[in-house]
Image: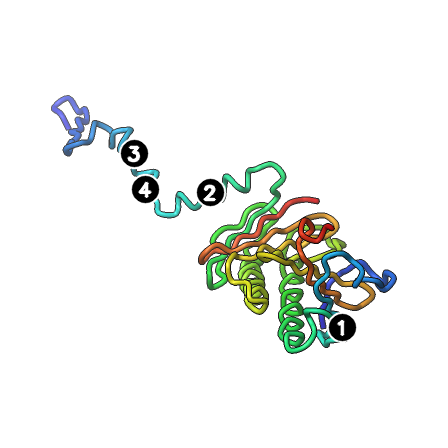
Amino acid sequence: MLAMRDAGDAAAPGGLEDIPGVLGLLTLDLSGHVLSASGELSGAVTEPVADCIFRLLEDVAHVLATSEGPANDSFRRLTVALQDHQYVISIANKKIYAAKVRPLAAAAP
Amino acid sequence: ITAGGQTKRTVRHSQGKQKGGWRKDQQQTCLTRNMEDKFLNTVNTISSESGVSGLVCADRHGLCLAAKGSGQASAAPYVNSLAKRAQLLGSSSGDNVKAPTLAIETDTQTISIQSSGDISVAVFKPA
């Protein structure tokens, strides 16, 4: 179970598919189980990507636990920037949301 | 000891040494001939830049090479693991060209992580 201080019980984000440049979406619970997948994150890549993302967040939790920030420091977002796309991962409403997006410059119409 | 009871010291000089030890230029050379100096100088340069509150360097096994400021040595294995997993995520997307950059954002700080060769580096910046 992922234990990390996040933004709290914010309203469940909706309309993520409408964000410009979104290539795929993945939703996990705090145990790493896939709740939904769409776009380029659906199909055969869902499970490996979900596993990778969950383990990334576990390591993030350890890094934040060992850093000298304040005790009530909340995790906001993890961004993994790759060559021509990036993954933006956040936690809200006890769920993990991961979006595969094109870089902002490429996403703009 | 001389006949008058005074102590007389004889200083032996080897070639290249002046009385009292090494020449100054030889001392300087000795001080800079540590193999990790170049690395440590780079670490100090980065961690002293404005806006940087901490830094952690880890080798390919996750062992801490350097930790400065708000970066703790105990974070080194996780910094290495994050950099490796990000590369796995990139390779699963068919992207093997460039090492990925991670950014961990919290309310108070941003931690940027990237690997270069066998070294993974995390730079801590206050928000």
Q: CA distance from mark 4 to mark 2?
A: 16 Å
- Where, by quadrant of the figure, is residue B38 drawn? top left
Marks 1 and 2: same chain?
no
What residue did someone put label 2 on? B42
Which of the two discs, 1 and 2, sits closer to the camera? 1
> Which chain is disc 3 placed on?
B
Give the secondary structure at mark 3. Answer: helix
Q: Please name whichever residue, B49 or A40, is drawn nearer the observer in this view of the structure.
A: A40
Q: Residue at x 86, y 60 (%)?
A: A10
Image: B89 above or below B20 = below
Give the secondary structure at mark 4. Answer: loop
Which amino acid type corresponds to the residue marked 1 in the rendered image? Answer: Asp
Marks 4 and 1: same chain?
no
- The reply to whether discs 4 and 1 touch (Cβ–Cβ < 8 Å) is no
Which of the two discs, 4 and 3, sits closer to the camera? 4
Q: CA distance from mark 3 to mark 2?
A: 22 Å
* Mark 2 surroundings: few (<14), some (14-19) or many (≥20) residues within 10 A: few
| Residue B37, position as x, y percentages in the image | 39, 43
Marks 4 and 2: same chain?
yes
- The reply to whether discs 1 and 3 touch (Cβ–Cβ < 8 Å) is no
What residue did someone put label 3 on? B27
Q: Residue at x 16, y 31 (%)?
A: B13
Give the secondary structure at mark 2. Answer: helix
Which amino acid type corresponds to the residue marked 3 in the rendered image? Answer: Gln
| Residue A75, position as x, y percentages in the image | 73, 57
Q: CA distance from mark 1 to mark 2?
A: 41 Å
Q: Residue furthest left?
A: B3
Which amino acid type corresponds to the residue marked 2 in the rendered image? Answer: Thr
What residue did someone put label 4 on? B33
Q: Please name whichever residue, B122 or A51, is drawn nearer the observer in this view of the structure.
A: A51
Q: CA distance from mark 4 to mark 1?
A: 53 Å
